Image (cartoon, grey):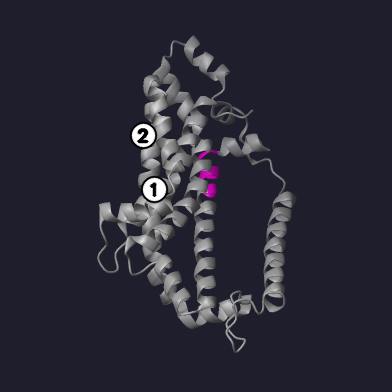
Amino acid sequence: MITPLTYFLVPQNLAAMTSQRSKLRGRLTGLAGIGLTIAIWWLLAATVFASVGARPDGSGGAIPTPLQVIQQFTEDGFGFYYRNGIVTVMEAGLGFLWGNLIALVLAAIALTVPKLDSLASQMAIISYLIPIVAIGPIVRLVVGSPSPGEPAGAAVVLASLSVLFTTYIGAVTGVRSTDRKILDVVTAYGGNSIDKLFKVQLLSALPSVFAAFKIAAPAAFLGAILGEYVGGTDVGFGPAMVNAQQSLEVARVWGVALVSGLLAGLGYWLFGILGRVFTPWAEVSAR
């Protein structure tokens, strides 16, 4: 097992031991998977599902082909997606920040005050069990409606609830899974529980925290979109999809959904990169 301490003690060339061939194979496999998915989507949209949800004249099926989505994307233009996307990204970013901050505070309370461990865990679990779609209207009544063009407070709150439990579990699990041998070394040299926490356990927990961030980023984006349905905002990917559905612009709905998925995946990829940069010993341990 590679720990933060042993990583910095062993020769650095061990941290770079990887096969370029396996990396290339992984990338090619990913591209092949994307290509196969698009091909299957195109085939089914043009054959099996061609008449699903179609108008009486045979046009406007519920499942457009990839080409129709691209054509609609070109027709709408970059400005349409930027104008709506920037609001949703702001809501997701604020929700991600506040949700993770609350989660880390609860984790710190659970780890430093054992008597409050159960209470902190229960609060995190409750945030996970609450159906965010059901409480959306209540949240809107509490936080109010946004001004035209501004992010919705309800979307920020729902995005926060979407990430709180994941980060809490990642932080607590990471700290508690620290190698006991390293903690014994700190004790042998006269260290106390605070020394163990700040000098060993928090460092060892970073890979778990970044792994939680990877999952939390897409979850925050999804929570923001769900919050826009009830948040009262007039811009964002949520209202854009609602308006497209009401006007039967099916290709636009799919375009907005695919761009939303792309941005959520970008958040996942970004925190994966940050995790490898700030916790290189975790990548070595996984090999």
Amino acid found under the numbered disc labelled 2: Val
Q: Which residues are magenta?
A: 272-279
In three-dimensional space, the C-alpha distance between marks 1 and 2, rounded to whole angstroms, equals 14 Å
Q: Report the residue at 70% width, 73% height from top.
A: 44
Q: Nearer the viewer, residue 24 or 165?
A: 165
Q: Nearer the viewer, residue 208 or 17?
A: 208
Quadrant location of the C terminus? top right
Residue 66 falls inside the magenta stretch:
no
Q: Report the residue at 49% width, 63% height from top.
A: 260
Q: Main secondary structure of the magenta part?
A: helix
Mark drawn on residue 42: none
Q: Is residue 74 above or below residue 85?
A: below
User: Which residue is label 2 attached to?
Assistant: 105
Question: Where is residue 67, by image quadrant?
Answer: bottom right
Quadrant location of the N terminus? top right
* Residue 201 rendering spot, x and y as whole percentages: 48, 26
Q: Is 131 left or right of 137, judged from the image as shown?
A: right
Q: Nearer the viewer, residue 32 or 84?
A: 84
* Residue 7 rendering spot, x and y as whole percentages: 58, 31
